[in-house]
Image (cartoon, rainbow, N blue to C red):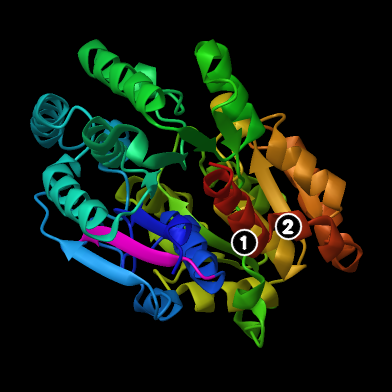
Amino acid sequence: MKADKRILMIVNEFPPTGESGVQRPLKFLKYLAADGWLCHVVTPKHLPKSVQDESLCAEVPASAIIHRTPSLGFRAKAVDKVAELRFQGNRGKLKATFMRFLMTLNHIIFPIDKQIGWVPFAFIHSWWLIRKHRIRNVYITAFPFSAFLVGILLKKCFKDRIFWVADYRDAWQFQPILEDVLPAFRWNIIRHWDKKVLEYCDRAVFVTPVTLDTYTKRYRWLKGRACYITNGYDEADFQDLKADPTASDAMYYMGKLYDLERGSILPLLKVMKEKELQLPLMHVGTIDKATRAAITKGRYDFYSYHGYVSHQKALELALGAKINLLLINDDKESEAVYTGKVFELLRSQRPILALGPRRGVIKDLIESTHSGEYAHLSNPGQIETALRKLLAAPESYSCDLSEIRQYERQHLTKRLAELYERH
């Protein structure tokens, strides 16, 4: 094995941890290994999330060497408890007050994130691996952003003897409403360490050109050391996959429902009920208590929740759905975000109803591929028009696969590999 094809991947969210954030590093690992790279993966033994998907373990290459380290990180729940808290209203005021007190403690104790307790263990093991195997290439992905602190420590130790790529799955200091919901001291800490990451890493990778542009405008010196590699879909996931007819007469949504303010499903449910467009709406994934309570209160009997399912099962349902639903937060920051699932929905070649901000990269993608209809999440009239169009002629919506080949995971992994091969 050539030294320039050895890579250390530091990945906090790794199978059997589930949910969408696992897909990107897992697919990079899969196709780097297929291309002859010797891959070492450092990941916590104590899973960072409560949601698990054992089926993802089958995608971990047999040649990859997985190092599961101890961790003092705290396991995250399936839904955003902060979002739940904001919508408790007058019910349970004492409990809400107590929870706000706990949130304040959380800001003080975990100013970056709750996985910071993994950092010393990940650093020590990564340092040992680099020394033992003479590894030069290092890849670290975030969220959680505390994982990037491992990269800073390694860079201080090894300097130019390692080449570190920091993969931003989210825009850390530019995340939606971050500045509004965090106290000033925590916001300043995040901004400080985000800048430090950019100063120490050899390359910073972002998931959209807009996020790349946002960072390079803030930090002019970053130009030339930053690029974007979008999320995508894995063609192998769809080979021999059979459409599940369960959702053949329904609208299907896979993902989280946890924000009644910015990415709520309620505007759609209200339109469907008031305009008598009540085809069944099938949801698999996770949902918070506030959203479930609002749906129950609204008596949207056509909505049904089926819990979390494996990634393969979720794709089978998408292939068989009458309409696939995509929800994007209705805020300015989300205009620049490609959600991971959008490419899988495009690959499913089923009609897509996408709801989000007035404009953005998702809107452009849906319209350019003629794969569905897009509507502003806060505009009931647009939602009704889009849904009626889809129901009237669903057969007229289907993405031409030649238009999305550039988003295939194998192709995207080659772009990542090129960053290392050039240096």
Residue, far front: 2
In terms of secondary structure, where does tag 1 sit?
Answer: helix
Quarter of image, res 216: top right
Position in image of residue 133 (x %, y %) = 27, 60
Q: Residue 296, percent across and down?
A: 41, 55
Is residue 283 among what the camera can see? yes
Camera-side residue of 82 and 315: 315
Q: Looking at the image, which residue is at 8% across and 28% down?
A: 105
Position of 96 relative to 267 (above/below): above
What residue does disc 1 label?
409
Q: Are marks 1 and 2 in contact (CB under 8 Å)?
A: no
Q: Residue at x 34, y 18 (%)?
A: 191
Q: Which of the image's four quarters has the N terminus?
A: bottom left
Q: Which mark is residue 72?
A: none
Return the mark for residue 352: 2
Look at the image and give the residue range highlighted in magenta: 36-44
Residue drawn at x 78%, y 57% is: 404
Q: Disc 1 vs disc 2: which is toward the camera?
A: 1
Q: Quadrant of residue 142?
A: top left
Look at the magenta stretch and give its main secondary structure: strand
Q: Residue at x 24, y 40 (%)?
A: 150
